Image: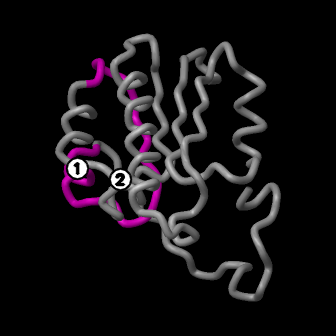
Amino acid sequence: MGHGMQCGVVQFIKGRNSTGEELFFRRFPEQVRFHVMGEGFTWETQDRQRDIAAAEAAWAVSRQLLQDPSIGLVVLDELNIALKHGYLDLDQVLGDLQARPPMQHVVVTGRGAKPELIEMGDTVTEMGMLKHAFQAGIKAQKGVEL
């Protein structure tokens, strides 16, 4: 955004609670297309078909962003979780990522990235938790997790 790029963000899992990133990005509607597509954390659901439908709807929006050459950066928040749970077809996702416009940057977040996605990436970072406040009973906090 600092370089004037048009950006697109699709959140695959988050959705029930307002987050700091949503509040921030909504301030820049002319520069960021922000889509909250999830229905909450996957471990809170009992309806796999509904989760699949939500992920597929999020991927449809993602594909539109990935096909738009005016978008310089696409962030696919928690896409790895949707793939890990089998909510999306991996081959379709990989194909759509490969077909994107030249020099369009894509950031995929979430734990448990598929090896095929790792292989495709130019830069891959794995973050690991050493200690977290929730281990001491502290729930998610604004400005930290939300």
**Label 1 to label 2: alpha-carbon separation:** 18 Å
Residue 45 percent location from the top left of the image: 54, 67
Residue 125 visible to an observer of this rendering? no
**Label 2 neighbourhood size at 10 Å, few (<14), some (14-19), many (20+)?**
few
The structure residue drawn at horizontal position 42% and vertical position 23%, both measured from the top left corner, is 65
Up-down relation of residue 22 to residue 119 (above or below): above
Mark 1, residue position: 90
- Compare residues 53 and 81 and report the one nearer the observer: 53
Residue 138's image quarter? bottom right
Magenta-drawn stretch contains 94: no
Residue 62 percent location from the top left of the image: 41, 32
> Element at badge 1?
helix
Mark 2, residue position: 124
Q: Which of the two discs, 1 and 2, labels the residue nearer the N terminus? A: 1
Tell me the magenta residue range. Answer: 100-121
Up-down relation of residue 15 to residue 126 (above or below): above
All told, the count of numbered labels is 2
The quadrant the C terminus occupies is bottom right
Query: Of the residues tagged 1 and 2, which is closer to the observer?
Result: 1
Q: Amino acid at mark 1?
A: Leu
Residue 124 percent location from the top left of the image: 35, 53
The quadrant the N terminus occupies is top right
